[in-house]
């Protein structure tokens, strides 16, 4: 089998030759996407941040050639053991070679179906401090066995790549798979992440547990949600994002209201979905500290946005959207944020969109302020 060696982070990896030569990485003999390095870098930072306070095993149920899991073993520090499982023996064969290249011990390999692997860990003393589920498509069918394989306080990280379902092209499928429906809006990536987190929360609730989301991302063709498992359901975080097409208003709500509280227009709602925080500021701080040490702060501006938006309202605005509504051009983001703050509103950029921002200002005020920010930007 054709394989090549690459280095990613501080880890040497054996990967299929076809995955680094072609435009689209092939699934056979094993899948590896060199362009998904960013998500692996951030997964290593998140695992490292989590491992600072939780010891135990890291379980990668769909490890592929082991790029993420081996980097966690080599770079994230203090998990006791790393279990790399993939149903594809060719992929696991490469992961074994990579582990040997890096001199990594305490890495355990297996080639089981993902839920079978997770079920083997769903026993006293066998549960993971962290579980990663990285499927093609939706993670929904793996959430039960993933949560059962996790210790309390453990971290579950899942990937979703079913963008069309989560993006509002197949509402019936989304309701069936995730238990809620999206809306096609400029903040669709946030809605998608919240649908995935909502599904994680609902499954945890059925098992008598709860989750708290500590970090989430949307990048290229995937969404990732990282959540800690809580021993109790906690306060309900499932609700709706209610959107008014007339005034552009948007807000998280426990109930589905069909009339806009601001303008009286008809509203639509996405959900049920996770309406709680998408970031834990302390957790993101730990990721940023590790990034400074490991990557020279390559992700510092991005993680700073995540930290600052942690306590901000759900459902962001974009400059283009609100400028178009106001009949003007978009001002620079920095000036828009300053203008909103100047009027006493809170305002922060969002990590989900380069022109996105979160604010507690009503949509009518956002619309008015985008015009004044645009004319102010002309004067300076
Ligand atoms: Zn309205």
Image (tube, helix red, strand yellow):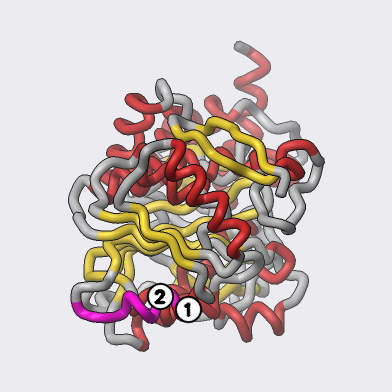
Residue assigned mark 2: 118
The answer to whether residue 236 is magenta is: no
Label 1: how many Cα within 10 Å (few below 14, some 14–19, many 20+): some
Residue 11: x %, y % from top left: 46, 34
Q: Is residue 198 left or right of residue 282?
A: right
Quarter of the figure with residue 254: bottom left
The reply to whether callout 1 and callout 2 are in contact (CB within 8 Å) is yes
Residue 257: x %, y % from top left: 54, 79
Extreme-top residue of the structure: 380
- What residue is at 81 percent from the left and 41 percent from the top? 23
Q: Is residue 230 visible?
A: no
Ligand 1 within 8 angstroms of badge 2 C-beta: no
Q: Which residues are magenta?
A: 117-124
Residue 29: x %, y % from top left: 71, 57
Q: Is residue 233 left or right of residue 321?
A: left
Question: What kind of element bears circle 2?
Answer: helix
Frontmost residue, 115 versus 162: 115
Frontmost residue, 249 versus 128: 128
- What residue is at 48 percent from the left and 36 percent from the top? 340
Question: What kind of element bears circle 1?
Answer: helix
Residue 115: which numbered mark, if any? Answer: 1
Label 2: how many Cα within 10 Å (few below 14, some 14–19, many 20+): many
Ligand 1 within 8 angstroms of badge 1 C-beta: no
Q: The C terminus lies in which quarter of the figure? A: top right
Extreme-right residue of the structure: 23
Q: Is residue 279 left or right of residue 164?
A: left
Q: Report, in whole angstroms, how far the alpha carbon at label 1 lies from the one at label 2.
A: 5 Å
- What residue is at 47 percent from the left and 78 percent from the top? 115
């Amino acid at each position: 089998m054709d394989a090549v060696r690459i280095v990613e982070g501080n880890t040497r990896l054996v990967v299929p030759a076809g995955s680094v030569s072609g435009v689209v990485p092939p699934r056979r003999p094993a899948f590896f996407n060199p362009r998904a390095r960013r998500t692996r870098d951030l997964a290593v930072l998140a695992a490292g941040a989590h491992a600072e306070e939780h010891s135990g095993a890291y379980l990668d149920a769909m490890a592929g050639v082991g790029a993420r899991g081996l980097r966690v073993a080599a770079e994230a520090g203090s998990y006791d053991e790393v279990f790399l499982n993939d149903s594809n023996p060719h992929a696991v064969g490469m992961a074994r070679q990579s582990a040997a290249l890096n001199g990594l011990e305490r890495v355990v390999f297996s080639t089981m179906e993902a839920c079978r692997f997770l079920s083997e860990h769903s026993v006293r003393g066998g549960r993971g401090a962290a579980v990663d589920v990285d499927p093609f498509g939706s993670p929904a069918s793996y959430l039960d066995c993933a949560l059962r394989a996790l210790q309390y306080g453990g971290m579950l990280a899942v990937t979703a790549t079913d963008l069309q379902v989560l993006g509002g092209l197949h509402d019936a499928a989304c309701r069936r798979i995730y238990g809620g429906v999206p809306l096609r809006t400029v903040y669709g990536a946030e809605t998608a992440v919240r649908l995935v987190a909502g599904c994680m929360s609902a499954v945890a609730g059925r098992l008598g547990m709860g989750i708290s989301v500590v970090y989430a991302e949307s990048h290229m063709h995937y969404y990732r949600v990282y959540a800690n498992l809580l021993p109790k359901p906690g306060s309900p975080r499932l609700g709706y994002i209610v959107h008014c097409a007339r005034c552009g208003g948007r807000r998280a709500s426990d109930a589905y209201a069909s009339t806009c509280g601001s303008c009286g227009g008809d509203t639509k709602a996405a959900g049920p979905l996770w309406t709680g925080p998408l970031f834990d500021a302390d957790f993101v701080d730990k990721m940023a500290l590790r990034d400074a040490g490991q990557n020279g702060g390559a992700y510092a501006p991005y993680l700073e946005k995540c930290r600052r938006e942690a306590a901000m309202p759900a459902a962001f605005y974009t400059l283009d959207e609100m400028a178009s509504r106001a009949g003007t051009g978009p001002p620079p983001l920095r000036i828009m944020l300053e203008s909103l703050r100047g009027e006493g509103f809170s305002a922060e950029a969002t990590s989900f969109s380069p022109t996105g921002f979160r604010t507690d200002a009503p949509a009518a005020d956002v619309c008015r302020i985008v015009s004044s920010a645009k004319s102010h930007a002309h004067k300076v």
